[in-house]
Image: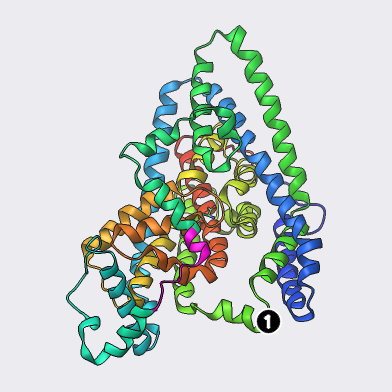
């Protein structure tokens, strides 16, 4: 491999940018520079995310089309497609199971005082009653009927249910999807108008379906007609890859801007920022421990299966993608960087990376599914509810589906968490409890999402003989 000739490697520069951003956030909060930070630094972070986003969608489209049209052998496409989906599904189920294991052992929801637990429990019971039979109790415990707690019950039932405006927004989105039929997910994959799909990052799956179909059809068109199209798209694809390279040169500064503005907008005082990080500490700790486990596991699996890639080496190669994921909280925005790392540094052939990675960015979210499993059980524990084995199995299923359905954008996992809560008859409005720390956990789970995609792509490429020898 070529040695980096000019000073520090990109990932170190990004890490430095990130740390400086966090230091700036503390200074900004301390010295009252938050307005300056929001007005003069924050916009550069937004520019970075926008640049990556406008590159991502066309890059996905052109690279899938070029990738498929260069495959020639259509049966190979089917085999790789099936393998890709199967392995992605497997890693997601593994992630949910690890999440469940960690949260059941650590029991972060039991860390609060007994009084607080009882109050939470009473609020849960009052909520179940307020649904008029739509939701059933999970057990026979009834604090609301115990005379000892009559005063608390009276006080709490007098309280109006205050619904956070953020929660209300999320609730609206969820109920919009609720009446959907069983085949709705399939219908949603088919674009109505490709221009509309191209203009919305949440519709990336539609762009993928369109591009796969376009690429396959290109294989069946006479060569004199298809060749100029492939050449043109190949050229356009190269231009987009060049754009990624150029944007990434500015990444250390952009990441500084992102961290500075996001962290300083989360709190008004240093104490609040520290509080925010410490509050929900046990829960965050379990989520982060689970995510760390996964992030250490993936490169190990890669180096076990792909003998020529050493453990530490894989980390180094995909670090720029991981750091971009951390600072943007979006696998979709990170996709161009992931593609560059996997193709240029890991050496996965372009036709393979351009097919497997975009699918991964949209359907494979291992960090998100792990977090959803931990969050649901934590929220149940906070309210003194024990979920049975069957209910935990339902969580494995719904968290898997929810992570597949989550768009690769910030906070998507939180929205889908409401579905998972609903699936086991818990109150979806509880997401408000974990909202304050969600942004930080979102950053962490996006890193795992991206690492999972890159690892699975490398493994599939190696089993298909699609790893280049020259890296
Ligand atoms: N932000 C995550 C992603 O883009 C999704 C989530 O909210 O968990 O991968």
Quadrant in which residue 390 is drawn: bottom left
Query: Position of 23 compared to 194: left or right?
Result: right
- Point out residue 118 in the picture as x, y percentages from the top left corner: 32, 84
Q: Residue at x 54, y 80 (%)?
A: 278
Query: Position of 390 compared to 384: left or right?
Result: left
Against 142, residue 227 (above or below) is above
Crowding around mark 1 (Cα neighbors within 10 Å: few <14, some 14 to 19, many 20+) is: some
Q: Which residue is mark 1?
A: 270
Depth check: give the residue in front, 15 or 429: 429
Query: Position of 134 compared to 288: left or right?
Result: left
SS state under label 1 = helix
Q: Residue at x 46, y 40 (%)?
A: 460
- Point out residue 275 in the picture as x, y percentages from the top left corner: 58, 81
- Point out residue 74 in the picture as x, y percentages from the top left corner: 44, 21
Query: Position of 415 compared to 393: left or right?
Result: right
Residue 27 shows in this picture: yes
In magenta, the rendered stretch is: 159-168
Depth check: give the residue in front, 98 or 175: 175
- Point out residue 113 in the picture as x, y percentages from the top left corner: 38, 88
Residue 307 shows in this picture: no
Q: Residue at x 34, y 89 (%)?
A: 114
Depth check: give the residue in front, 200 or 52: 200
Q: Residue at x 45, y 78 (%)?
A: 282
């Amino acid at each position: 491999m070529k040695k980096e000739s000019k000073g520090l490697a990109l990932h170190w520069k990004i890490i430095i940018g990130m740390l400086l951003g966090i230091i700036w956030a503390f200074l900004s909060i301390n010295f009252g520079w938050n307005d300056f930070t929001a007005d003069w630094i924050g916009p550069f972070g937004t520019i970075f995310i926008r640049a990556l986003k406008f590159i991502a969608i066309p890059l996905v489209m052109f690279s899938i089309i070029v990738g498929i049209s260069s495959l020639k052998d259509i049966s190979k496409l089917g085999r790789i497609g099936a393998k890709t989906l199967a392995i992605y599904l497997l890693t997601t189920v593994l992630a949910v199971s690890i999440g469940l294991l960690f949260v059941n052992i650590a029991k972060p929801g039991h860390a609060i005082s007994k009084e607080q637990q009882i109050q939470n429990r009473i609020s849960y019971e009052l909520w179940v009653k307020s649904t008029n039979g739509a939701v059933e109790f999970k057990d026979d415990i009834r604090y609301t009927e115990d005379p000892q707690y009559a005063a608390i019950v009276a006080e709490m039932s007098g309280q109006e249910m205050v619904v956070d405006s953020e929660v209300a927004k999320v609730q609206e989105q969820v109920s919009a999807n609720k009446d959907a039929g069983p085949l709705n997910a399939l219908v949603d994959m088919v674009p109505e108008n490709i221009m509309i799909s191209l203009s919305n990052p949440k519709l990336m799956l539609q762009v993928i379906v369109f591009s796969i179909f376009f690429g396959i059809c290109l294989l069946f068109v006479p060569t004199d007609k298809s060749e100029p199209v492939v050449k043109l798209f190949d050229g356009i694809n190269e231009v987009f890859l060049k754009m990624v390279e150029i944007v990434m040169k500015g990444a250390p500064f952009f990441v500084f801007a992102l961290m500075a503005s996001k962290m300083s907008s989360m709190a008004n005082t240093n104490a609040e920022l520290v509080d925010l990080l410490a509050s929900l500490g046990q829960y965050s700790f379990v989520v982060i421990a689970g995510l760390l486990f996964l992030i250490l596991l993936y490169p190990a699996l890669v180096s076990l299966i792909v003998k020529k890639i050493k453990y530490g080496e894989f980390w180094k190669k995909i670090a720029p993608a991981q750091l971009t994921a951390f600072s943007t909280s979006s696998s979709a925005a990170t996709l161009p960087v992931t593609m560059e790392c996997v193709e240029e540094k890991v050496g996965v052939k372009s036709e393979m990376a351009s097919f497997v990675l975009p699918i991964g960015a949209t359907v494979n979210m291992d960090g998100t599914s792990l977090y959803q499993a931990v969050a649901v059980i934590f929220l149940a524990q906070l309210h003194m509810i024990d979920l049975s084995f069957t209910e935990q199995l339902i969580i494995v299923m719904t968290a898997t589906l929810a992570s597949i359905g989550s768009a690769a954008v910030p906070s998507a996992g939180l929205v889908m968490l409401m579905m998972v809560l609903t699936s086991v008859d818990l109150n979806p409005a509880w997401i408000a409890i974990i909202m304050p720390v969600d942004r930080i956990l979102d950053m962490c789970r996006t890193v795992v999402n991206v690492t999972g995609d890159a690892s699975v792509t490398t493994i599939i490429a190696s089993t298909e003989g699609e790893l280049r020898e020259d890296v």
